[in-house]
Image: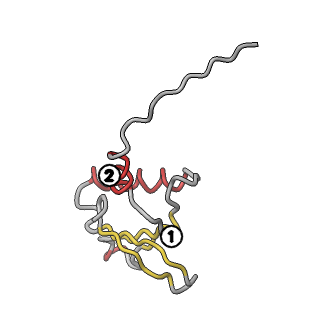
């Protein structure tokens, strides 16, 4: 379960690639949630960095009347933020190193 939806790994048959798909149900049930989802999608699309997951596609229903859920297709990554945070809890805070440069 991801933020605002269910996340699973799937195969995109058009490009023959493993991707992650996030289904966001009842997208307009609460306007505050809809705005957060829109903000998340816009930010992810604007941020182009190796450490930020890429949005490959956003699929909406063909008819406005049936617009209750969207599917966001992301690149498939090895782990999620929760796993990264959990793994780094065991490491602890790295020691600080100071270097003095003299000429």
Q: Residue at x 39, y 59 (%)?
A: 80
Q: Where is residue 45 shown, x and y percent of the image?
A: 52, 56
Residue 26 in which image quadrant? bottom left
Q: Where is residue 95 shown, x and y percent of the image?
A: 45, 31
Q: Is residue 78 above or below residue 16?
A: above
Q: How many marks?
A: 2
Q: Nearer the viewer, mark 1 or mark 2?
A: 2
Q: Is residue 50 above or below residue 22?
A: above
State the separation of the CA atoms marked 1 and 2: 29 Å
Q: Where is residue 91 shown, x and y percent of the image?
A: 38, 44
Query: Dot 1 lies on which element?
Result: strand
Q: Residue at x 28, y 61 (%)?
A: 28
Q: Is residue 96 above or below residue 82?
A: above
Dot 1: within a 10 Å radius of its alpha carbon, few (fewer than 14), some, or many (20 or more) residues? Answer: few
Q: Is residue 57 left or right of residue 30?
A: right
N-terminal of the pair, mark 1 or mark 2, is: 1
Dot 2: within a 10 Å radius of its alpha carbon, few (fewer than 14), some, or many (20 or more) residues? Answer: few
Of residues 86 and 54, the one nearer the viewer is 86
Residue furthest to the top: 103
Q: Residue at x 44, y 35 (%)?
A: 94
Q: Residue at x 29, y 60 (%)?
A: 4
Residue furthest to the left: 29
Q: Where is residue 29 shown, x and y percent of the image?
A: 23, 61
Question: Can you say which quadrant of the picture contains the C terminus?
Answer: top right
Q: Is residue 85 left or right of residue 31?
A: right
Task: Tell whether label 2 touches label 1 (CB within 8 Å).
Answer: no
Q: Is residue 70 left or right of residue 18?
A: left
Residue 101 in which image quadrant? top right
State the scheme by which the image is colored: secondary structure
Q: Which residue is mark 2?
A: 86
Of residues 10 and 89, the one nearer the viewer is 89
Q: Which residue is mark 1?
A: 57
């Amino acid at each position: 379960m991801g933020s605002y939806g269910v996340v699973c790994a799937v195969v995109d048959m058009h490009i023959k690639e493993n991707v992650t798909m996030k289904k966001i149900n009842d997208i307009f049930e609460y306007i505050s949630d809809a705005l957060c989802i829109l903000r998340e999608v816009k930010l992810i699309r604007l941020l182009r960095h190796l450490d930020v997951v890429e949005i490959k596609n956003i699929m909406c229903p063909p008819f406005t009347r049936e617009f209750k859920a969207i599917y966001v297709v992301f690149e498939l990554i090895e782990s999620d933020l929760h796993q990264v945070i959990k793994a780094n809890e065991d490491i602890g805070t790295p020691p600080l190193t100071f270097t003095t440069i003299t000429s």
